[in-house]
Structure formats: structure tokens, C-alpha cells
Image: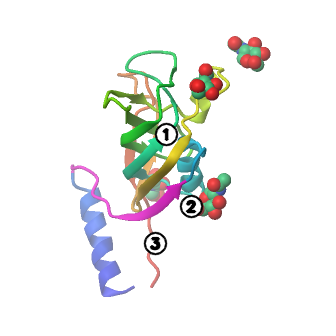
Amino acid sequence: MTKYSLLLTLLLAFLENSNSSFISYSVNYADRFHPYQDLMTQILNITSFYNLQATNIQTCVGSVLYCGIRTANQNFLTNFTSGPYEIVSLVGTISQGSQPHIHISLSDKYGNMVGGHLPSLEERQFYNQTDFSCPIYTTAEIILSENVNLVFQRPIDPQTTYDELQISYRNITFAS
Ligand SMILES: *[C@@H]1O[C@H](CO)[C@@H](O)[C@H](O)[C@H]1NC(C)=O
Ligand SMILES: *[C@@H]1O[C@H](CO)[C@@H](O)[C@H](O)[C@H]1NC(C)=O
Ligand SMILES: *[C@@H]1O[C@H](CO)[C@@H](O)[C@H](O)[C@H]1NC(C)=O
Ligand SMILES: *[C@@H]1O[C@H](CO)[C@@H](O)[C@H](O)[C@H]1NC(C)=O
């Protein structure tokens, strides 16, 4: 074990026992998506390819042709078709083995904004619609951050009845 990995181990042990936010360090994955690729499918391809356990979207700038979105507090999806749209923001957390939690804002040629919850592939199927995808128009430049010392899980929260984010420290063994 090197001096630094020992220090890191001690720091993590200290943090795990303190009643605070989870303090993480991250490794980034930068990518560029291409025309007609589906935004959600491509994000999940990265997280599953690298088996990422605790990811957040650091940035995403680009454009989409149209987009299926679940707007606030609705139990159906809306197909926004007045595109192409600029992706003005994309925020979210992604874990393995549970639904990604991603919100998107889009602006049209007048500068008008729409936005809401970007449905997972399962949600799209659940609403039984053929094409609630969000295909890239020209590009999407994206950087995902993996919080390498954390694990994100989504058990049901009895208070909200939704599958809310549960953060824990990952058990890491450092190479000597
Ligand atoms: C999924 O991601 C991997 C790693 O970046 C890449 O090699 C592969 O081409 C991607 N698959 C698709 C369908 O985009
Ligand atoms: C879902 O779509 C399939 C294929 O179009 C159709 O056969 C089925 O009846 C639909 N189910 C519901 C609940 O609408
Ligand atoms: C959404 O709009 C696009 C573009 O007009 C269309 O191709 C797609 O079939 C629509 N999806 C649904 C579920 O209506
Ligand atoms: C880490 O190890 C502890 C003790 O073995 C275990 O209780 C905990 O669930 C593990 N954490 C994760 C994220 O697997």
C-alpha cells in the first residue's frame, strides 16, 4: 500500500463514520453522439459498457429532432415535435439495476423552452408507445462523471412511494 492510498483509505474511513454528505471523487467519460442516435440509449450504453455504479451527467450540449418527455406530475409521455431543439440542459443520476433519473430542457427556434423527465427505456415500454425516443439532430457532446467511491441504488422510499436515490460508499480495495 502506498502512502497516498493509505491516506485515502483513512480519509474514506473517517468520512464514512461522519454524519455528512457523501464525499466523492470522480472519473469522467467524454463522448459525442451522432445524428439519429437515441439520447437515453447512448447514455445507458456508456454506463453499462463501463459498468458504472454511481454516475452523474456533468454536461451535455447538442440538439435533438424531437423528444418524448414526461412533464411534471403527469402519468403519460408527451411527444414534443416542434424541433429541432437545442439541448439546453441535461441533468441526472444513473445507477446500475434501477431506473436512470434524468431531466432535460429543450429550446425551439423561437427560444421557447419545454422540459421534464426523460423516460427510461422501461418507461417508454410501459406507456406502450412505439417511438418516444429523443434522437440526436446534429450532435450531443456529453461528459459523464462516475463517482468511483460511491454506489447509487434506488429502493422505494415509503414517504414518497417512489424509488429514490440511496447513496453509499463503495468497498474499495487499493492495489499495493
Ligand atoms: C457503446 O459504447 C462502446 C464504448 O464507448 C462503443 O464501443 C460502442 O460502439 C457503443 N455501442 C453503440 C451501439 O453505440
Ligand atoms: C401495446 O402495443 C401492442 C402492440 O402495438 C398492442 O398489441 C397492445 O394491445 C398494447 N397494449 C396496451 C395496454 O395498450
Ligand atoms: C413522435 O414524433 C416523431 C416525429 O414526428 C414521430 O416520428 C414519432 O412516431 C412520434 N412518436 C409518437 C409516440 O407518437
Ligand atoms: C461494504 O461492506 C460492508 C461490510 O461488509 C457491507 O455491509 C456493505 O453493504 C458494503 N457496501 C456495499 C455498497 O456493497
Quadrant of the drawing holding the N terminus: bottom left
Residue extending farthest to the front is 109
Residue 16 falls in image quadrant: bottom left
Mark earlier in primary sequence (1, 3):
1
Q: Distance between the residues labelled 1 and 3?
A: 41 Å
Mark earlier in primary sequence (3, 2):
2
Residue drawn at (46%, 23%) of the image? 70
Nearer the viewer's eye, disc 3 or disc 2? Answer: 2
Counting from the top left corner in percent of width and height, residue 26 is at 36, 63
In the image, residue 122 sits, relative to residue 166, either above or below, namely: above
Name the element at disc 3.
loop
Q: Name the residue under label 1.
A: 64
Mark earlier in primary sequence (2, 1):
2
In the image, residue 117 sits, relative to residue 153, either above or below, namely: above
Residue drawn at (49%, 15%) of the image? 75
Q: How crowded is mark 1: few (under 14 residues within 10 Å), some or many (20 or more)?
A: many
Query: Would the CB of label 3 be found within 8 Å of ligand 4?
Result: no
Any magenta on residue 40? no
Q: Name the residue under label 3.
A: 173
> Identity of the amino acid at label 1?
Val
Q: Name the residue under label 2.
A: 50
Quadrant of the drawing holding the C terminus: bottom left
> Identity of the amino acid at label 2?
Tyr
Q: Which of 51 and 123 is in front in this view?
A: 123
Query: Is 50 left, or right, of 82 in this rendering?
Result: right
Any magenta on residue 26? yes
Query: Is 122 left, or right, of 110 in this rendering?
Result: right
Counting from the top left corner in percent of width and height, residue 5 is at 34, 79
Nearer the viewer's eye, disc 1 or disc 3? Answer: 1
Q: How far apart are marks 3 and 2 (CA)?
A: 19 Å
The quarter of the rendering in which ligand 1 is drawn is bottom right
